[in-house]
Image (cartoon, rainbow, N blue to C red):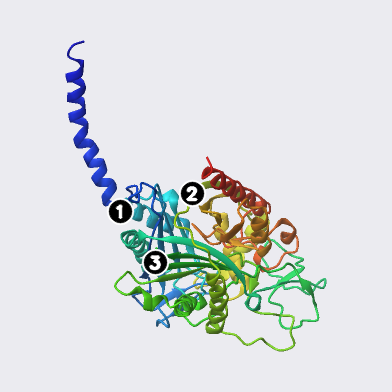
């Protein structure tokens, strides 16, 4: 027994190198706890926008019914990366100028970033803006992925997150919401019986709803929902008020731009920086970064179809209008020197709607008539989609997330989400302020509510971009609300 104190001393000596190694490793990847001189935790933010423009042309572009290519860059594409640290944990958010990004590509990017930063992949959110003028990172409808770009993109996203972490600095955080009703309208209409567009091989034969029916169409009865007009803004500033980053959220599908382009999402970032004087304030510090996330725009776009004449807009005017609304919110923000960060993630398995034997046989027979080329018509696209779906697993696993930033809640869903779903999440969330980022952590297709499934129309037509079971939306919504409640409660325990 007399030797016990010496044995304890020996054990302590052996533990010292291990503890030092752990400390050095933690410091190297930015995960060390940060405290002020008074011992209270320090909130930090780091941001970086990395260029993800294609380097080889022509490049395949998706977002349309059939495949197209682009041979030039109209404006640069970026992955806009943000790392936040409350002194005990870090999270990463990246917003990529892309139409949609598959789960496997994003998991690859997260793994690379995690290895370099120490941030767990479960505390990383990566979303696509849904520009329809970017390289194809996944196959959808008549387009195949561009293999060269797919190989290039994950590493760039990872580099952006890594640099954002390196840019971490003391910060304060605040958020606010304003309104912009002039660039978001529900695009789905209930049509008179027999007047809605119908396409073969989609799983629907008597559609009652139609997307984009044209101006003042006499066969259009009413819109099938209402839009979310919120412009949500999260602002990060240095303690003395210098803008570090701004994360925004708006629920319009996209504006439309020639390829290759970030669409209004990219122009917005330039406009809001100008409006708040962020570029001039940066000085020798890392440059200011803004990012616009897509909210819940699965059934909404910039076109008001209840008009006699077209509403004039382009991706510059949309960006200017939304930036003006974002500035209004920005000017009202009350900042917090520190805010708790929480993030939770869940996996949800859902069934896939598959063609039956007769539908599949007819689709295969039809696809055989154009087997030597890409599909050119809507019927050809959906026939090919039926065949492709039949070769894929009968279920899909979705990654859903919720984030707490103080009294702000953020939901992340890997789908194109209807406005009503986003509005319901905002109403049912425990947070005073909530918004949803769609096409986050994957691209699992449209999720109409069950009553909207019954109406048919493009966003319900069976394809890789709309294939989940008809009860998917309520299951997804329930899961993200559960996650929001979890992160809301966690910071209070």
**Along the polypeptide, which appears first: circle 2 or circle 1?**
1
Quarter holding residue 150: bottom left
Please tell me the numbered disc located at residue 116.
1
Q: Is residue 448 above or below residue 188?
A: above
Instruction: Kindly report which numbered mark, 3 or 2, lies closer to the viewer in this rendering.
Output: 3
In front here: 92 or 369? 92
Q: Could you tell me which secondary element the residue under label 3 belongs to?
A: loop
Confirm whether residue 385 shows in the render. yes
Q: Is residue 303 left or right of residue 85?
A: right
Please tell me the numbered disc located at residue 342.
2
Determine the CA span between mark 3 and mark 2. 25 Å
Label 2–label 1 contact, CB within 8 A: no
In front here: 370 or 343? 343
Q: The N terminus appears in which quarter of the rendering? A: top left
Instruction: Point out residue 237 in the picture as x, y percentages from the top left corner.
Output: 42, 65
Instruction: Point out residue 384 in the picture as x, y percentages from the top left corner.
Output: 57, 65
Q: Could you tell me which secondary element the residue under label 2 belongs to?
A: strand
Q: Could you tell me which secondary element the residue under label 1 belongs to?
A: helix
Residue that mark 3 sits on:
240
Label 3–label 2 contact, CB within 8 A: no
Instruction: Kindly report which numbered mark, 3 or 1, lies closer to the viewer in this rendering.
Output: 3
Instruction: Point out residue 53 in the picture as x, y percentages from the top left corner.
Output: 38, 74
Determine the CA span between mark 2 and mark 1. 21 Å
């Amino acid at each position: 027994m007399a030797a016990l104190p010496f044995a304890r001393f020996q054990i302590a000596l052996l533990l010292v190198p291990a503890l030092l190694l752990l400390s050095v490793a933690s410091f190297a990847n930015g995960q060390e706890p940060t405290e002020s001189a008074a011992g209270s935790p320090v909130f930090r933010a780091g941001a970086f926008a990395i260029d993800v423009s294609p380097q080889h042309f022509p490049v395949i572009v998706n977002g349309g019914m059939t495949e197209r290519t682009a041979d030039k860059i109209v404006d640069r594409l970026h992955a806009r990366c943000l790392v936040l640290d409350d002194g005990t944990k870090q999270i990463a958010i990246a917003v990529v100028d892309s139409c949609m990004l598959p789960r496997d590509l994003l998991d690859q990017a997260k793994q690379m970033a995690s290895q370099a930063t120490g941030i767990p992949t479960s505390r990383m959110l990566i979303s696509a803006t849904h520009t329809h003028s970017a390289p194809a990172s996944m196959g959808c409808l008549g387009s195949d992925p561009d293999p060269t770009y797919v190989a290039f993109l994950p590493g760039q996203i990872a580099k952006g997150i890594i640099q954002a972490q390196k840019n971490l600095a003391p910060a304060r955080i605040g958020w606010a919401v304003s309104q912009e009703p002039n660039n978001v309208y529900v695009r789905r209409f209930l049509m008179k019986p027999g007047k809605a567009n119908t396409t073969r091989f989609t799983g629907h034969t008597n559609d009652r709803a139609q997307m984009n029916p044209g101006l003042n169409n006499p066969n259009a009865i009413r819109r099938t929902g209402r839009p979310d007009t919120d412009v949500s803004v999260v602002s990060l500033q240095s303690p003395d008020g210098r803008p570090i980053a701004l994360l925004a959220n708006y629920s319009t599908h996209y504006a439309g731009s020639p390829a290759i382009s970030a669409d209004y999402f990219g122009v917005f970032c330039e406009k809001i920086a100008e409006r708040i004087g962020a570029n001039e304030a940066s000085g020798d510090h890392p440059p200011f970064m803004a990012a616009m996330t897509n909210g819940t725009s699965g059934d909404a776009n910039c076109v008001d179809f209840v008009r006699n004449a077209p509403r004039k807009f382009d991706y510059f005017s949309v960006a200017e209008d939304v930036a003006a609304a974002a500035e209004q919110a920005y000017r009202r923000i009350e900042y917090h020197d520190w805010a708790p960060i929480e993030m939770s993630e869940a996996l949800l398995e859902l069934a896939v709607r598959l063609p039956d034997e007769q539908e599949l046989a007819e689709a295969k027979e039809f696809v055989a008539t154009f087997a030597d080329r890409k599909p050119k018509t809507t019927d050809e696209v959906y026939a090919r989609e039926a065949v492709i779906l039949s070769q894929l697993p009968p279920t899909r696993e979705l990654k859903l997330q919720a984030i707490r930033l103080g009294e702000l809640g953020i939901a992340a869903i890997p789908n194109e989400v209807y406005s009503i779903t986003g509005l319901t999440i905002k109403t049912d969330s425990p947070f005073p302020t909530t918004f949803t980022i769609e096409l986050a952590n994957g691209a699992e297709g449209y999720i109409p509510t069950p009553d909207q499934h019954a109406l048919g129309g493009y966003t319900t037509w069976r394809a890789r971009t709309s294939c989940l079971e008809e009860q998917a939306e309520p299951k997804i919504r329930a899961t993200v609300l559960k996650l929001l409640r979890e992160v809301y409660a966690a910071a209070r325990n």
